[in-house]
Image (spheres, helix red, strand yellow):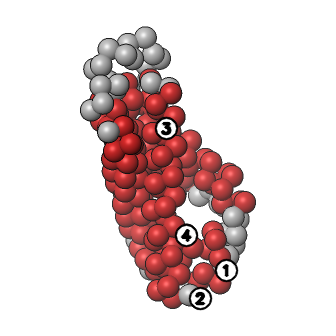
Amino acid sequence: MTRNRAVYAILWGGLVAGAIDITYAIGFSAARGVPPMRILQSVASGLLGSPAYQGGAATATLGFVLHFALMLMIAAIYYFASTRLRFLVTHPIGWGALYGFLVYWVMNLVVLPLSAFPSQVKFVPILLITSLIVHAFGIGVPIAVASSKAQAATGAGPGSGLNQNQPAM
């Protein structure tokens, strides 16, 4: 049963966060005249480099799959950390927002520079602000809430009495 709860938390948290994030990225970029295919190809460029932009629908599809694979990994990291650090599920909104904030910085300062992504990461103020908000509340919080709900269903999450002396956020 515990394995099913982990799968639930990771799938729901990762898929909801992934849907929110890619919707934001496509919408924000579309408002600036960038087609959705280009956004998905930019995700694939982390693996393929510049040739991703010449791959048409195939590399856009690859970018879509990679995006959700990353979100599932990000959700799995939070879920498994929260099984050891119980306070992460006791206060999922605060800790989830902090996690989303950290995910943004790790992706932009570590993952992208180490990938084949062909451009230097830039921090344009409006993009930075909106991205931090989306990462905090559209990625971190859904992942944390899914983890919290999954663990509450096993009797180990919020309301179980096991987490009362943990740090609040």
Mark 3 surroundings within 10 Å by alpha-carbon count, few (fewer than 14), some (14 through 19), many (20 or more): some
> Label 2 vs label 1: CA separation?
8 Å
Mark 2 in CB contact with mark 1 (< 8 angstroms): yes
> Label 4 vs label 3: CA separation?
26 Å
Mark 1 in CB contact with mark 3 (< 8 angstroms): no
Residue 86 pos. (x, y %):
44, 24
Label 1: which secondary element: helix
> Label 4 vs label 1: CA separation?
11 Å
Give the residue number, with chain letter if any, for mark 1: 50
Give the residue number, with chain letter if any, for mark 4: 43
Q: Quadrant of residue 52?
A: bottom right
Can residue 29 be spotted in the picture? no
Q: Residue furthest top?
A: 165
Q: Quadrant of residue 28?
A: bottom left
First of labels 4, 2 by sequence position:
4
Give the residue number, with chain letter if any, for mark 3: 80
Give the residue number, with chain letter if any, for mark 2: 54
Mark 4 in CB contact with mark 1 (< 8 angstroms): no
Residue 100 pos. (x, y %):
49, 43
Mark 4 surroundings within 10 Å by alpha-carbon count, few (fewer than 14), some (14 through 19), many (20 or more): many
Give the residue drawn at x 69%, y 52%.
110
